[in-house]
Amino acid sequence: MKLTFLGTGTSQGIPIVGCKCAVCQSDDARDHRLRTSAFVEVEGLNILIDAGPDLRQQLLTNHITRVDALLTTHEHKDHIGGIDDIRPVNFLMEKTMPIYGLPRVLHVIQKDYDYAFKRVKYPGVPDLSLIPVHDEPFMVQHVQVTPIHVQHLTLRILGYRIANLAYITDANFISEKEMAKLHDLDVLVINALRLEPHYSHFNLEQALAIIARLKPKQAYLTHISHSLGKYVEVAPTLPENVFLSYDGLSVEW
């Protein structure tokens, strides 16, 4: 398997427009974060997790021209605002793009991108197929995906387990039932917004506590705000098997 972090920032990205803090003014490329998204290569399939407003730039930067499926975590615009940029992938592959997500999320996508779902379509619109996700595992072609239901304040959203990888972002609570799906992982990706507690996201302390409990071989922190601190200062403080992700980081195992 191979995991590439296309974006690791929070909803505003880093740098934030107009911010003069040390992180936003950093000249370290690892502190420049696009909106959160990931790309998983597994058993010959290319699976995209979330398609935020930076998707075009992420596809170009990482030379991605084939995507077999899009998994959505939830409907906030930093996670689905770039779906129109699926179009060139449609053209290259000459295939419809299957989009998986909670029924509520698919309804928002159909509303926001209504021109892609009209009976008579304008030429060149995205070619999308919406596939609802519920509680049970589902197949993306020959690869099984297990949905992980987590809370983003009062909003139920999805993480995903693909083989021995689990990817969770924007969460602030995981029930015991869903935690049971996260054992025996080689790689766990989990959000860690900042040092201080937050009402709808795990902070660093909470993310590290979950990692310590689940004991994955490796863990990577994502959905990071400028309030967490500079990469060069935060990364050395983490446990041996925990890493601060950054845009463009690839992990293979």
Image (cartoon, rainbow, N blue to C red):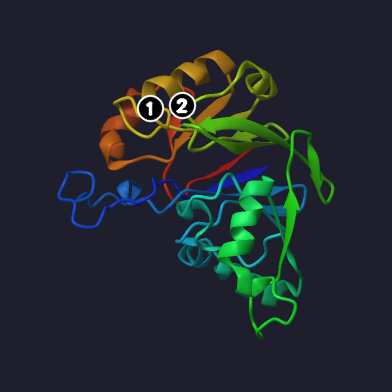
Say which quarter of the image contains residue 202: top left
Q: Secondary structure at mark 2?
A: strand
Residue named by callout 1: 203
Mark 1, Cα crowd under 10 Å, few <14 / some 14-19 / many 20+, is: many
Q: Residue at x 48, y 64 (%)?
A: 61
Q: Residue at x 39, y 45 (%)?
A: 10
Q: From the top left corner, tell me how far across and down residue 85 is, in percent.
A: 55, 69
Residue named by callout 2: 242
Amino acid type at circle 1 is Asn
66 or 161: nearer the viewer: 161
Q: From the top left corner, tell me how far across and down residue 27 is, in percent.
A: 23, 52
Which quarter of the rendered picture does the N terminus lie within? top right
Apparent side of residue 253 relative to residue 57 in the rendered image (left or right) = right
Up the image or down, 174 lies above or below 74; here it is above
Q: Residue at x 46, y 65 (%)?
A: 57
Between marks 1 and 2 in the image, the one whose residue lies nearer the viewer? 1
Q: Is residue 77 visible?
A: yes
Apparent side of residue 229 relative to residue 108 in the rendered image (left or right) = left
Q: Residue at x 46, y 16 (%)?
A: 209
